[in-house]
Amino acid sequence: MFAPAFTTGYIPFSNGTNLTVDAAYFWDNSNKRLGVGTSTPVSSIEVQKNSLGVTPSLTDGLTLRNTTAAGAGAQQKSPSLWLQGQGWKTTATAASQSVTMGMEVLPVQGSSAPS
């Protein structure tokens, strides 16, 4: 059963931490699914935003952010996003094996702007 829609608030986790939500969201407590912009999430976390056009914007999806200021020679990387799947290996002892890929932004210090 879905909880009523909220415009802002907190979603509690069993370890005592809270997820802060600043957009319309729906929480399906029985299936542990969060929908942002949708009242019927089909995955653990679903963000739905329609009619986006072709210009990217930080407000259009999921943002992982590190707001700690960088210093000279001390850049601040973004939080990581990790994806993991399972693939089959055929040599030696055939078996399933995990494949993991991470994504992050690591700024490079520059004279007029970082890149």
Image (cartoon, rainbow, N blue to C red):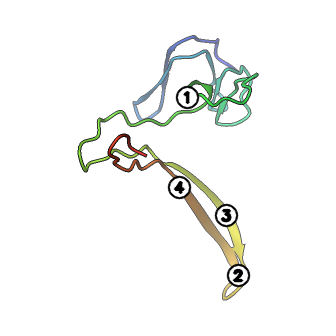
| Camera-side mark, 4 or 3 | 4
Mark 4–mark 3 CB contact (< 8 Å)? no
Q: Dot 4: what SS?
A: strand
Marks 1 and 4, the one that precedes in the sequence: 1
**Toward the viewer: 50 or 34?**
50
C-alpha span from label 2 to label 4: 25 Å
Q: Which residue is mark 2?
A: 94
Circle 2 residues within 10 Å: few <14, some 14–19, many ≥20: few
Q: Which residue is mark 4?
A: 102
Q: Which residue is mark 1?
A: 58
The percent position of residue 20, horizontal first and vertical second, equals 46, 23
* Callout 4 amino acid: Gly
C-alpha span from label 4 to label 3: 15 Å
The percent position of residue 109, horizontal first and vertical second, equals 34, 48
Q: Dot 2: what SS?
A: loop
Marks 3 and 2, the one that precedes in the sequence: 3
Mark 1–mark 2 CB contact (< 8 Å)? no
Q: Dot 1: what SS?
A: helix
Marks 4 and 3, the one that precedes in the sequence: 3
